[in-house]
Image: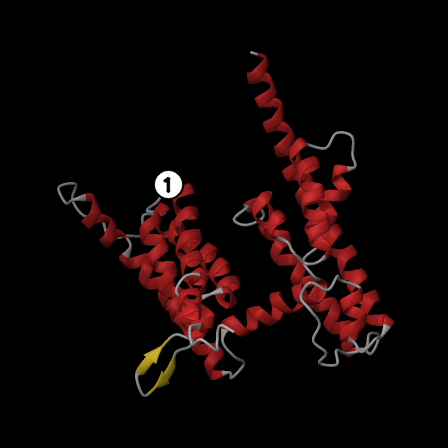
Amino acid sequence: MVAAVGIDAYLWKGVDSSFGLMGIVASFGIANSLARQNKVDGVSAGIIALSSFIVVTPFVSGETGTGIPVGYMGSKGLFVAMILGIISASIFCWFIKRDIQIKLPDSVPPAVARIFSALIPGAAIITLWLVVFAVLDKMNIGNIHDIMMIVLGGPLGLLGNNIFGTIIAIIARRKNASKMTKAMAPLTLTPGIFNINEPAMFGLPIVMNVSLIIPFILAPVANAVISYVAMASGLVARTKGITVSWTMPPILSGFLITGNHISGAILQLVCILVDVAIYWFFYKAVEKQNLALEAVEANEVMN
């Protein structure tokens, strides 16, 4: 109906101009936040990370000129933006804290001095990502966005995103669970069964939570390795190109996308158990922080 009245193009323009910028915004925001936490210039770190994001993103050329594909600026580039933002900010902090920078006299305005201070680390970081882009391009193995989508996005798509709700629900059954966990369990488990993971991602939160960044990266990699080995060895039937709804619960979706083969469901069950094991100890650390914070708040109320 929207296409019939001719406004679909304008609606997509609005989507691409807002949600379609998630990758770019994330690359700047993550680097900026991490740098500020380390007491260095966050704006410079964010700009360098944003520039690096553009460096590793392939350009497309046409009659009207050269540009960046909209898809890579949005959710498709989010994995790269997160990883690149963290790495770029960490390198930037390393340079600044070791005084590897251009220092100007105190009489120079701080805004100008910060620009010159960022030149050396900025050149090093952008050059690093340029080399990464060039190597991948010359080896003809695709760009870093596509690689991350395969390494991280593929296993997440096969597994489904219900893992966080599962872990929270298990821990919430303990008598000494924090109020946060007990409150989040029903909000994350049921939607998580249908791969609606926003309550866990932004409610705990998992997004930009340093305590959970290691399992957030490690679990999909483990899924990728397990899935590849299982399918390559013939233990699990390969996917048949069958498309299922993204809200299809895991185990059932594994059964369907492998052509109604029980091995696909078993593979997803194994991946879920592995992910629970990976996340378990990290989330227990988060749980200790929640309990400590709640204890402090309780003492403040009593006093």
Whether 34 is drawn above or below 244: the answer is above
| Residue nearer the viewer, 6 or 92 | 6
Q: Percent x, y for residue 33?
A: 42, 47
Whether 199 is drawn above or below 287: the answer is below
Secondary structure beneath dot 1 equals loop
Q: Name the residue: 73% across, 47% down.
A: 167
Q: Neighbour class for label 1 at 10 Å: few (<14), some, many (≥20)? A: few
| Residue nearer the viewer, 82 or 298 | 298
In this rendering, position of residue 299 left or right of residue 41: right
Total of numbered circles in the picture? 1
Q: Name the residue: 52% across, 74% down.
A: 1
In this rendering, position of residue 52 left or right of residue 293: left
Q: Percent x, y for residue 159?
A: 72, 63
Q: Name the residue: 61% across, 65% down.
A: 152
Q: Percent x, y for residue 83?
A: 50, 59
- Mark 1 is on which residue type? Lys
In this rendering, position of residue 112 left or right of residue 189: left
Q: In this figure, which residue is indicated by the disc labeled 1?
A: 39
Farthest residue, direction left: 107
